[in-house]
Image: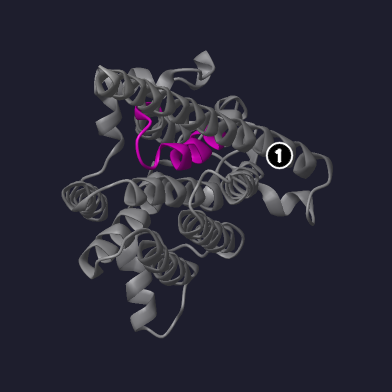
Amino acid sequence: MARRGAARRGAAGRGAAGSDQRGRGEGGRLLVLLAAAGGARAVYATLNRVPPGEPALWERRNHRARVVTLYQGPAVAAALCTAVGAAPQLPGGVRAATVLAAATAAGCGSYDDLAGGPERGLRAHLAALRRGRVTSGAVKLAGIGTAALGAGCLVQRRPLDRLLAAAVIAGTAGAVDLLDVRPGRAAKAVLAAGLPTVLRGRAGSALAAAPVGAAAALLPDDLAERTMLGDCGAHALGAALGTAWAAGSGRTALVLRAAALAAFHTAAERGAYREQWWSWPPLRRLDAAGLPRSAAP
């Protein structure tokens, strides 16, 4: 009888501990999400108030020839790196991997935003490199690839898994950038892809909360055509989300994610990725959500 009572008390204790751990996990995800969202809003407001350099340097015309700023990119990059770096519930290696991947991706993307040439696509950048000219895209490819490999080594232990993790991190960064051609499209993609990871509450969920929070915070300004992610913000969001996936995946999931990303990039490079994809009703509705009526596809 005494042993049965002790067993029941032990089971109850384990249940309470598990519930407490789940509660801390949910609270940790929420804190990271709110920190990233609040930080993005704060940095964005500061950049609008005190532009770094001439304001014209940070202005571009979007697909409708409307003038937008590039402030969204540095804002989301700074916010998500700070939110992850200050999150005590995340292992140190995971925090370092995310900051490494996202900060490097943001820096390389910002260089491409501000000093990029006319080349578009991997083939164009490699062709320029063969002619002896180093383009901003080549710098971006080398920088993000190297940082992704470093981050992969921090979040995985086995050599093959590290390479797969690097492919997921770099591939996700590039995929989000490819989507940044219409207001809000890339940020919506980060929300649609990242929210399930956050809500599942498994490995990588608190980490995924950072790009999700940062993307959501400035989505209204993106949709209103006041600002855009640019290469800086799109690559940073993608690198952070890719690191969350790489950190929380076993080998099978890593293989599947890497294969899907490779297929997407191959289709894009061969010209198979077209705006016609977005005429499919579910994607068209997602693309139009939140846009002014005059800007809806």
Q: What kind of secondary structure does the magenta stretch mostly adopt?
A: helix
Range of magenta residues: 199-215
Structure colour scheme: one colour
Amino acid type, label 1: Tyr
Picture quadrant where residue 32 is located: top right
Q: Nearer the viewer, residue 146 or 28?
A: 28
Q: Is residue 162 left or right of residue 13?
A: left
Q: Residue furthest front?
A: 2
User: Helix, strand or loop at disc 1?
Assistant: helix
Residue shown at 59%/51% (left/top)? 85
Q: Nearer the viewer, residue 175 or 88?
A: 88
Q: Residue 6: give x, y in percent of width and height.
A: 32, 23
Q: Nearer the viewer, residue 127 or 48?
A: 48
Picture quadrant where residue 38 is located: top right
Q: Nearer the viewer, residue 233 or 255?
A: 255
Circle count? 1
Q: Is residue 258 left or right of residue 50?
A: left
Residue shown at 30%/58% (left/top)? 165
Q: Is residue 262 left or right of residue 152?
A: left
Q: Residue 295: give x, y in percent of width and height.
A: 50, 22
Quadrant occupied by the N terminus: top left
Q: Residue furthest top?
A: 293
Q: Residue furthest bottom?
A: 132
Residue 203, placed above or below residue 93 = above
Quadrant occupied by the C terminus: top left
Q: Which residue is mark 1?
A: 44
Residue 226, placed above or below residue 237 = above
